[in-house]
Amino acid sequence: MERVYNFLKEAQTYYLATIEGDQPRVRPFGTVMIYEGRLYIQTGKVKPVSKQIEANGKVEICAFKNGEWVRVAGVLAEDDRREVRQAMLDLYPELQSMYKADDGNTVVYYFKEAEATFASFASAPETVKF
């Protein structure tokens, strides 16, 4: 999981894919953290992405840097603890003008099961589960 986290942090932007009905939805994200041994992301409850995750927690993330990429397929679950929301906001102070740990909008999700595949055009894919 550390390797996935480090890759996503270094890439700075990753793309999160969800499903809405029968339509895939993809959008850029940047928030990621490890907390108590889990990989977390953050968004707002009022956003369509949150509603899509609540309806179907199966998602994929993809990030690319320096000729390599990682794809993370898994299931997200909400963690409704205030301290986790605050930990995420502490890592990303630039979000604190839009989100607060107790605003009723900030939501954090963790991968309750995931498989990450690291790949490039120069080497064979490597898969790790967490």
Image: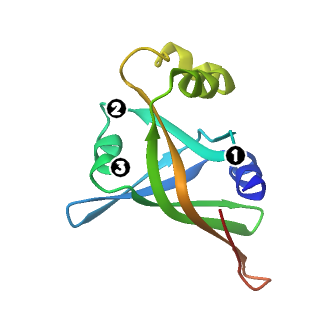
* Residue bearing the label numbered 2: 45
Where residue 81 sits in the image (x, y, percent)? 50, 27
Q: In this view, does 42 lie to the left or right of 26?
A: right
Look at the picture and state if 109 lies above or below 125.
Answer: above
Q: Which residue is drawn at 27% across and 52% down?
A: 55
Where residue 93 sits in the image (x, y, percent)? 64, 19
Q: In this view, does 107 lie to the left or right of 118?
A: left
Q: How far apart are marks 2 and 3 (CA)?
A: 10 Å
* Residue bearing the label numbered 3: 53
Q: Distance between the residues labelled 1 and 3?
A: 21 Å
Number of numbered markers: 3
Q: Could you tell me if the residues under marks 2 and 3 are in contact, i.e. CB atoms within 8 Å?
A: no
Q: Residue at x 62, y 47 (%)?
A: 39
Q: What amino acid is labelled 2 in the image?
A: Lys
Q: Which mark is residue 108?
A: none
Look at the picture and state if 60 lies above or below 39.
Answer: below
N-terminal of the two: label 2 or label 3?
2
Q: What amino acid is labelled 1 in the image?
A: Gly
**Mark 3 Cα within 10 Å, few/some/many (few <14, many 20+)?**
many
Q: Quadrant of the C terminus?
A: bottom right
Which mark is nearer the camera, 1 or 2?
A: 1
Q: How far apart are marks 1 and 2 (CA)?
A: 24 Å
**Mark 1 Cα within 10 Å, few/some/many (few <14, many 20+)?**
few
Q: Residue 37 carries which label?
A: 1
Q: In this view, does 26 lie to the left or right of 119?
A: left
Element type at mark 2 = loop
Where residue 60 sits in the image (x, y, percent)? 48, 62
Element type at mark 1 = loop
Q: Image quarter for residue 4? A: bottom right
Q: What amino acid is labelled 3 in the image?
A: Ile
Element type at mark 3 = helix
